[in-house]
Amino acid sequence: MNPLLKSILSPQFVFAIIRVTTPLLFAAIGVAISALSGSINIGLEGIMLISAFFGVIISAFTGSLVLALIGGILVGIGMGALLGYFHLKLKADIIIAAIALNMFASGITIFFLYIFTHDKGTSSSITSLVFPSLQIPIIKEIPILGEIISGHNVLTYFALISVALFYYLIYKTSLGLRIRAVGQNPDAAESVGVNINRIKLYSLLLSGFFGSLGGLYLSMGYVSWFSRDMTAGRGFIAIAAAALGGNFPLGTFLGALFFGIVNAIAIYIAPLGIPSEFINSMPYIVTVVALAIYSIRLSRRKKMLSKKEEV
Amino acid sequence: MENILSLKNIVKIYPNGVIANKEVSIDIEKHTIHAIVGENGAGKSTLVKIIFGEEAPQEGEIYYKGKKVNIKNSLGAIKMGIGMVHQQLMLAPDLTVAENLILGIEPLRYGVFLDLKKITKLTEESSKKFGFKIPLNKKTRDLSIGIRQRVEILKVLMRNAELIILDEPTSVLTPQETEVLFKSLKDLKHHGKTIIFISHKLKEVKLIADKVTVMRDGKVISTNDVNQLDEHMIAHMMVGRKINFKRIPGIKKVGDPLFTVKNLSYLNEENIYVLKNINFEVKAGEILGVAGVEGNGQTELVEILTGLREATSGQIFIGEEDVSRFSPREIREEKVAHIPEDRMKNGVAEHTTIEENIIVDRYYQDHFSNKNLFLDWKYISKFSEELIKKFKILTPSSKAAILSLSGGNIQKVVVARELSSNPRIIIAAQPTRGIDVGSEELIHNLLKDARDNGIAIFLVSADLDEVLKLSTRIIVIYNGEIVARFNDVNDITQRDLGPYMLGVKKKGE
Amino acid sequence: MEKFILKYFNLIRVAIAILIGIIISVCIIYIISNEPGFSLKSLFLGPLLSKSRFGNFIETASPIIFCGLAIAIPFQAGQFNIGAEGALFIGAVVGTAFGVSTNMPAFLHIPLVLLVAGLTGAFWGFIPGFLKAKWNTSELVISLMLNYVAYFIGLYLINFHFRDKAAGYLASYKLPETAWLVQFILGTRIHIGVIISLVFAVLVYYFLYHTTLGYEIRASGFNIDFARFGGINVFKVIIIAQVIGGFIAAIGGMTEVMGVHRRFNWQISPGYGWDGVVVAIIGRNNPLLIILSSLFLAYLRVGGRILNLLSDIPAEMITVIQSIIILLITAEAFLGGWKYRITVREAKAKEVGHEPST
């Protein structure tokens, strides 16, 4: 047991947690923003996938990291716009439309992967770029802490910053206020002149933006290639993470972190013979339990006669 | 005194053909509290929706501050200085009071960020200016309705409203909160605001309003200074009309009490007693009519009687049996039929066929199914076709979708189903609302026949004509209480009932 | 003519959506392929060109039909339970575990293995159903999470308790022959499970439209307030619809194992649960239409595989096409303008000589 404990309590392990959490965090923020406006986007799985693919392809064919970044982001936002169009304009059910978009992304990425590389599995036959890792001067010299914090991919740092961005957006901007209002009581928003559909569209575009970064990280940071269905359900885990965190910025971060920790543990534990499947299933089981508890409390609150404040 | 708002000859016809406003003309003077009163369907809600830009009139003109205007939507109305506090409060529950107040008019720094300092400053200033003491940093879901309403009013004031419309504001308030509201309204008036106040509670109108406009059947009956009238006069203007129906002949034999309600009370989620100590009984072979303006507890009462809602205290008996805690299925098995007030919400499933709607309460019974397992569609179709004939439902077949029927025919399907279940008791809520005259006549005759056959009928209706035409006895409900009982209805008219319905009188005064 | 259009509007919309999907695939083939004619033939006629391919087509439809039914029943009750994938997986695992650990004659073994699988799936449907009925928890999120739990627990069970080390890859012990579903058409892998899927579709059709419980389910889906008002126990309905869905999905998974693979060898989740969502939507939750839409999807799948084999076009094109078809179908307002114009014209025609509008 000793060597395992040693490796879990090592700075490398914490480093690994941060690495693994990065795509989950981006996706979870994407889900949370859309959920706050009342139109939850369960298509982050597809958005991440399609951005991951286009980042790789663009970087391989243009040799430009910047173009790959821009292209990947645009594709992600585009998917968000597509979802917005079908749901808000054509009145499609947002869940079914998102499921369709996930399928679409899965199919089209492999389709084009084959067209461009004649390989259906991975893009390893072409050379794509990766986003650089950053060694933070001074901090990297600090024992333990330095090993944990310094050396991450630039997108990882941006993911952490994104939590702050999410917080500022939602609580400190008028768009964020309107998103929250639309999600809580659309009639209230409409009665003061807020355009509900426009706000929902913005939230979907934003979720596409953050999702695209998660995807770009996967194929151009976490690893340096695209492989079929490489998102591996992260888009759905993100839904659980956001739900666990109540769609709040801090909660979403903790939810994503929770799943990241569990994933990292699974990787480390594997050589030990403890079934990784147990570890891997834990976050999902915990989410089921947590959501059940949350619902119970919500329904109890409605039943009880609450005492209101008098001023 | 100048008029801040003048409406001239407003006509509003809804797509279903109902004429809600017929040549309505009203002048609202500046710095007054102007009440608009009328029964349900009188047209007052439509009128204020037009003023606030939520509906557009077919004909007529609106003059605001002397200039002719075209109010396209609520944003336009707000920009002109018109504000409305709806009956359903429009606040985002998890946002703070301050956030709700500045939603849509957020002060910004650098064009993007909320200027929190300015928000605090603005909301505090407004709050002080109008004398509202509201906790600005509390989430609105943690506040009582009275305070939430004040937030709504402050919301309107902060958008520089000079004309404020309040739609039935006291319907959700306790007496104490009402007092506080009225003081605020008087203060606002002194601040130079003009207030339009919709209500059906005449005592309150007398208390707070300077002028009152009475509406009836879509028309303005008259506009007067409040101190020229007393409540009785207002009530009579609201409900008096030519008697244009014939009361159904009474039945001689009325049987034993079939349906008894004892001390029924209901406290809702907002901690308000929507029903207070309701007592009544309905005998076999009689129609007990409940007169009252909607929103006085009738909806909750009917839901409790039919098992769709649980009472806070009290008992319900069918015969000798205590059915207070019965489920809807169990109540129906006691042979109670229910014609619901919202037919589209509860009465039918609009996307499926007439047949499937007819069997919802009996699909498991003999003939309709074999051993409560397999549906007998042949029997169901035959049964449905017979009902269609008997109730004169206009439709090509029993397999037509409910969606394809007109409102009157949909109601006929509901009534057909309920009356054909062989009930001993019928609970009918607004049974002829929104349907054509022919269907209304038919349903009234059916209720009369049911009564003649010894069925006990509990009729709740905001349509006074209907109540007077059909009822053997009448009770009047106001503010969750029964305020009058009339056991001999032969010479009663709307004028007698009006004052009770409007809170002017209480039996025993 | 216009009356006809209005009456069957939804079916026509689906047909048009499918047509658009086909047109898009034809366009893609023309753009990408060097031999468009040959490619088109492979895709659209491929499954018909040989016995084994035709068999492939039929046998692929089987689990899709099961999952289509498994999704359709909760959908008809207004429940968004997409847990067919998980129920199918864990049901097949537990059924296989039971099958390899027991010995009995086939006439007992087959139904019992199926039953064990089905009950496992039923339990998997019960969890989201109960949580929704009692506390209004989102059955969508819960069933989605349980899909993953089923996957991991299932893999664990196979990996650590029923793994056939001799097999060389992750797979369970082979099922005894008494638990096999016979492949009864020579030259193909078409097995009894295919027949079972068709039987189930007919049974579910009968269940939904001719039984009291089926009526309760559909009434709750049409208008839950109406169902409650009429006396239906909607608490029970919400749960039962999802339990039955889980049961059927698990049977579908188990028949695949018993009929095709004869051991549990799924290393990743097979995806039939998601196919079930597709065919349930295209088939508008009607079991008989689901047979057709499942055949349609299976045909396209196999055609796509053949296309992939014989030309340079990836089979994933089919996934793209199917997703476009679903998007168009679920967009209620798709062709809505057309429907509105026809409706107005019909209404105007009706106005002559009828009662005044109400």
Image (cartoon, coloured by chain):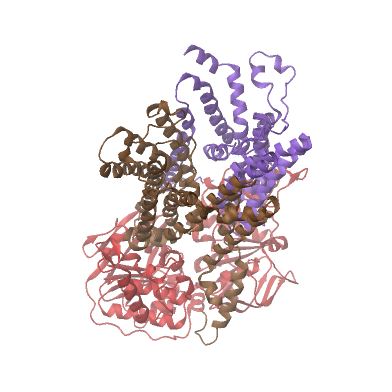
- Look at the image and give the colour of chain C: brown
Measured along the vertical axis of the image, is residue A155 above or below residue C194? above
Is C214 left, or right, of A26 in this rendering? left
Q: In screen coordinates, is B470 left or right of C143?
A: left
Residue A106 picture location, percent across and down: 60, 44
B192 or B140: nearer the eye?
B140
Judge by depth and name the residue closer to the eye, C34 or C88.
C34
Task: Please identify which colour was used for chain B in the image.
Answer: red
Q: Which sits in the foreground, A207 or B282? A: A207
Query: Of B391 and B309, which appears nearest the observer?
Result: B391
Q: Quadrant of the C terminus of chain B?
A: bottom left
Residue B325 is left or right of residue A228, and the answer is left
Percent across and percent down for residue A2 are 49, 12
Residue B501, x across and y down, in percent: 44, 71
Q: Quadrant of residue B111?
A: top right
- The number of numbered discs placed on residues in the rendered structure image is 0
Colour representing chain A? purple
